[in-house]
Image: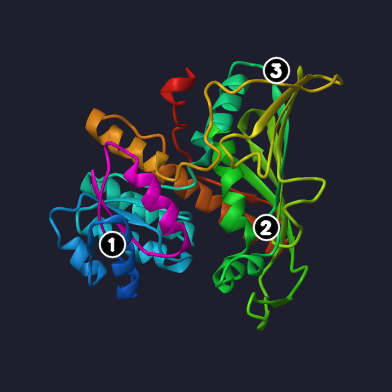
Amino acid sequence: MKVVIVGCGNIATAYSKSILEKSNLQLVGFSDIDVVRAKTFAQEYGGVAYASLEAVLADANVDAIVNLTIFDAHYTVIKQSLEAGKHVYSEKPLALKYAQAQELVAIAKARGLRLAGAPITFLGEAQQTASKFLLDGGIGKIRLVYAEVNWARIEGWHPNPKPFYEVGPFLDVGVYPLAWLTSLFGAVKRVSAYAKTLYPNRITKEGVPFTITAFDYYVANLEFEDDITVRLTVNFYVSHSNKQGSNIEFHGDKGSLSSSSFAGWFMPNSKLEYAPFAEAYTEIPLVKAAPEEVDWARGLEDLASAITENRVSRVTGEHAAHVVEILEAVNTSATNNTPVTLTSSFDKPALMDWVK
């Protein structure tokens, strides 16, 4: 599958390297509103530096668009690409509004195109091992999940923190455990959330003060079918190295499973530990050796294989759209101080072949 990366920001480097390692993907070019940046990537990783998105979409040699633009450009870029007859794989979120996400899914379906989106970290070795263990009844009936996303302060590492604070931590990083949990349990049915702006006055790496008005702290209770409750806490304030961590814990009638590391719901080599109820934890092995970094093109690789094999991919627009509905519901619930009922659904993805 011949792909073009649209949006040559920070994450484009990781995607480029990962795409080049896939035998069923060919990176044929780059596009960015800053043409010089696109040319720099093309010189580094090969392919064409397109003058515009329109030039990319007019190229019959291009099969799919890898959309890595900023959050508020996702909807427009995806819609243009689908309407031009291109498959699309997008970084999260699919759109900033659920109605827009629904529209994109409908366009793809009507045109017979594939639409997929991040996060794909639930396809990691640790996450797939844990999913298999849980689905096989390893901790019995699951009733409660604790997920922590302590993602520090964006200005401490990113040169342009403003867009992250405009959308908030739930949309930026809360989506990672959300994607995994929904891949396991299916659609969320009801959301109750609280949010607050903890730390409004911030300073960039260059020493420039700026103020945020959006929420930088959330705690949400997510109710799934089958009587499963998730408490998910997300913030752009607490350090990565805090004692509580950024982990995920599954609790069932027979025991508990913990995935821990820098981010237990994110890293493919996260440590998995199981404990029978009220007993000590012991480590359980991963089903295969895991890389130390996220394989950013794993979902795109699976999408290309799914097209070739005429099967459903493990990442779909419907799943990504449901995550957008959750994000919208969390903000609505937190703003209005009331629970929100969700309506969308999707088919849960299959486990990776190597974990079965």
In front: label 3 or label 2: 3
Closer to the eye: label 1 or 2: 1
Q: Provide the secondary structure element on which disc 1 rests.
A: helix
Q: Which residue is mark 1?
A: 42
- Return the residue nearer the eye: 317 or 155: 155
Q: CA distance from mark 3 to mark 2?
A: 31 Å
Of the numbered discs 3 and 1, the one sitting upstream in the chain is 1
Q: What's the residue at 38%, 64% (across, down)?
A: 8
Instruction: Name the residue located 27 percent from the left edge and 42 percent from the top edge.
Output: 25
How far is the residue under mark 1 from the one under mark 2?
A: 44 Å
The kind of residue on which mark 1 rests is Ala
Of helix, strand and loop, which one carries label 3?
loop
Q: Which mark is residue 140?
A: 3
Q: Is residue 26 magenta?
A: yes
Question: Looking at the figure, which quarter contains the N terminus?
Answer: top left
Q: Is residue 221 left or right of residue 54?
A: right
As measured in the structure, the alpha-carbon distance from the residue carrying label 3 to the one carrying label 1 is: 51 Å
Q: Please determine whether, in this image, residue 293 is positioned above or below residue 155.
A: above
